[in-house]
Image: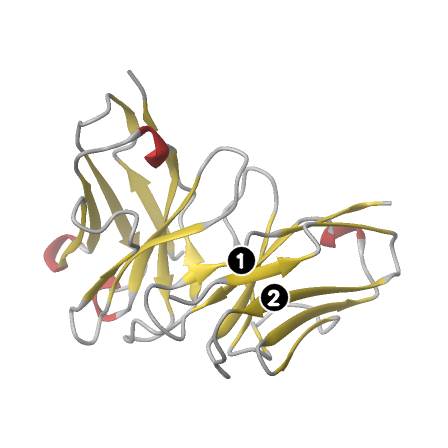
């Protein structure tokens, strides 16, 4: 069965760091575009970052650029989101998602269950 | 950056109704727009890609269309399972963006 499983969320103080992981099972994750989408409690979806399977280019929302880094480990079939200089407004459920095809220009047709990141003093 | 504005924010409807959700883009593009359905506590589910292409397994009562910078998701004959929040997303240019969501609730 194909699935994505996120981990690494938790409570962190403002200015701190966390690294989220997303392990794919049942598929070779590295050949597809994939990314992270977040949802603050009670609010809508916000696109965070995308990693292109075809070119290995990365794209970021302005709100996280310079603080977050998306990366992959092909050998572990895993996508990461390194989050530094965290702010209270980064508090959200973070979803890992897979695009269709290798391009970054694709919708997310497969999603993980999400992992909660809470930034608070 | 492309901003997406959805309307209405909340829509009250009954089973069997025809409902329409609109997503207006701040810049014109023609192809790379998707619609998602999300239920409370769950991840979003892709319904429509490339404006009109229905995902496998999605009922044909969901119809995507476009006219200029305005994109529309129509549910033709609302079913009990359709009460949820719907989001549009543009993946035409980066940064990608979502609309703010439309909650379809029971009237």
Find disc 1 in the rendering and name its residue.
B99
Quadrant of the image occupied by residue B60: bottom right
Quarter of the figure with the N terminus of chain A? bottom left
Q: Label 2 is found on which chain of the structure?
A: B
Percent x, y of residue B11? 77, 51
Percent x, y of residue A11? 29, 22
* Mark 1 Cα-neighbour bin, 10 Å: few <14, some 14–19, many ≥20: many
Q: Residue at x 33, y 75 (%)?
A: A101
Q: In the rendered view, does B70 fall on the left or right side of A1?
A: right
Find disc 2 in the rendering and name its residue.
B23
Comes first in the chain, label 2 or label 1: 2
Secondary structure beneath dot 1 equals: loop
Is residue A19 in view?
A: yes
What's the distance in space between the residues labelled 2 and 1, CA to CA?
7 Å
Q: Nearer the viewer, residue B105 or A54?
A: B105
- Contact, mark 2 vs mark 1 (Cβ under 8 Å): yes
Percent x, y of residue A41? 49, 33
Identity of the residue furthest to the top in this view: A121
Q: Label 1 is found on which chain of the structure?
A: B
Q: Residue at x 61, y 45 (%)?
A: B39
Secondary structure beneath dot 2 equals: strand
Q: Residue at x 81, y 60 (%)?
A: B78
Quadrant of the image occupied by residue A97: bottom left
Q: Residue at x 42, y 63 (%)?
A: A108
* Mark 2 Cα-neighbour bin, 10 Å: few <14, some 14–19, many ≥20: many
């Amino acid at each position: 069965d194909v699935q994505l499983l996120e981990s690494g969320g938790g409570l962190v103080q403002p200015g701190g760091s966390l690294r989220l992981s997303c392990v794919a099972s049942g598929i070779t994750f590295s050949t597809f575009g994939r990314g992270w989408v977040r949802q603050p409690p009670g609010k809508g979806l916000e696109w965070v970052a995308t990693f292109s399977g075809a070119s290995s280019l990365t794209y970021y929302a302005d709100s996280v650029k310079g603080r977050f880094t998306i990366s992959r480990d092909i050998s572990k079939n895993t996508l990461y989101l390194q989050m530094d200089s965290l702010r209270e407004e980064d508090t959200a459920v973070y979803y890992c998602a897979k695009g269709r095809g290798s391009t970054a220009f694709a919708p997310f047709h497969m999603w993980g269950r999400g992992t909660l990141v809470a930034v608070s003093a | 950056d492309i901003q997406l504005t959805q309307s209405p924010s909340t829509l009250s409807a009954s089973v069997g109704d025809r409902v329409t959700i609109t997503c207006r883009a701040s810049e014109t593009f023609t192809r790379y727009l998707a619609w998602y359905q999300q239920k409370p506590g769950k991840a979003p589910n892709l319904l429509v890609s490339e404006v009109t292409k229905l995902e496998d397994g999605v009922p044909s009562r969901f119809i995507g269309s476009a006219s200029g910078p305005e994109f529309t998701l129509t549910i033709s004959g609302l079913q009990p399972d359709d009460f949820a929040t719907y989001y549009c997303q543009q993946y035409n240019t980066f940064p990608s963006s979502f609309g703010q969501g439309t909650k379809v609730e029971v009237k």
